Amino acid sequence: MTTQLPVSTNVVWHHATISRAQREAQNGHRGAILWFTGLSGSGKSTLAHAVEEMLHFRGCRTFVLDGDNVRHGLCGDLGFSAKDRQENIRRIGEMAKIFMEAGVIVLTAFISPYRADRERVRGLIEHDSFIEIYCDTPIEICESRDVKGLYKKARAGQLKEFTGVTSPYEVPENCELTVSTGTTDLDVCVQQVIDKMIRSGIIQH
C-alpha cells in the first residue's frame, strides 16, 4: 500500500533564527504531537478536545487538528481510497510537525487506519515528541453511537471504503498509550493522557 513519495528539487532548507528550544522556553512546555487514532465513533475528537481544554487551563499552547475539519480545506480534494488516505495523513503529519516546531502541543484526531502511515509520521520527529494514543472502542459501541449515521450507510452499501466495515483498520502494535474510550469515563481518559504527557516530560506536573 505504501509508496515512495516524490521529493521537490532545487530547494534548500532555510534555518530559522529563532529555534524550537527558544519557542518552547517561551511557552513553558515542550512542543509535541498527540496522535489520537481509532475507529469512527471511538471518541478521538471528544477526547482530543477535552485534553486540549485541560491543557489550556494549565496555560499550554495547543491546537486540535480534526479529521472532518481538515477535509473541509487542506485535504478537501481527497477521497477515501487507500492512496488518498495515505496522502491525507502525510499532509497532516507535515502540518503537525510545523506546529510542534513552533513549540505547540498539537492534538490530531484522525482514524488514520494504516500502521505504515502512522509510523511515517512518527519517523518525521524525535521519538519522545510523538505520543500515539489508541482510542480502543469495540465497533459495536462505535456503531451504537453513530451520530453521523455513517455505519448505517456503510452497512446499507451506500458508503464505500468505510473503515471497520468495508475498509480495514490496523490496530496499533506499539502505541504509547491505549485508552478504553468505549467503557471509561471521559475525565479518567483525559487524566490518563495528561499523566502520560507528564511522564514523557512534555509538561510539568
Image (spheres, rainbow, N blue to C red):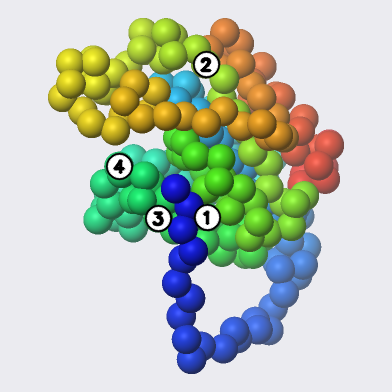
Residue 148 lies, in percent from the top left, at 27, 23
Q: Amino acid at mark 1?
A: Gly
Q: Which residue is mark 3?
A: 87
How far is disc 2 from disc 4 in space, using C-alphas?
Answer: 22 Å
C-alpha span from label 4 to label 1: 17 Å
- Is the residue under label 1 in contact with that under label 3 (CB below 8 Å)? no
Q: Which mark is on residue 93?
A: 1
Could one spot residue 187 in this view of the protein?
no
Tell me which amino acid carries mark 2: Thr
Give the class, few, some or many, for how many residues have Cα within 10 Å of label 2's Cα (few <14, many ≥20). Answer: many
Residue 170 image offset from top left, x and y in percent? 52, 31
Question: In the visual, does 196 lie left or right of 160?
Answer: right
Badge nearest the viewer, 3 or 2: 3
Residue beneath label 4, please? Answer: 80
Q: Residues within 10 Å of mark 4 (few under 14, many from 20)?
A: some
The span from disc 3 to disc 2 (Cα, nearest Å) is 26 Å
Q: Residue at x 65, y 82 (%)?
A: 16
Q: Are marks 1 and 2 in contact (CB under 8 Å)?
A: no
Image position, residue 118 (x, y; %): 56, 45
Label 3 residue SS: helix
Which is in the foreground here, disc 2 or disc 4? 4
Q: Secondary structure at mark 2?
A: loop
Q: Could you tell which of marks 3 and 1 lies nearer the N-terminus?
A: 3
Q: Amino acid at mark 3?
A: Glu
Residue pictured at 52% horizontal, 16% vertical: 137
Q: CA distance from mark 3 to mark 1?
A: 10 Å
Q: Earlier in the sequence, mark 3 or mark 2?
A: 3
So how many labels did they put on this image?
A: 4
> Against 92, is 18 above or below?
below
According to the picture, the residue beneath numbered tag 2 turns out to be 137
Q: Which residue shows up at 36% across the image and 12% down it?
A: 143
**Closer to the camera in the image, 144 or 27:** 144
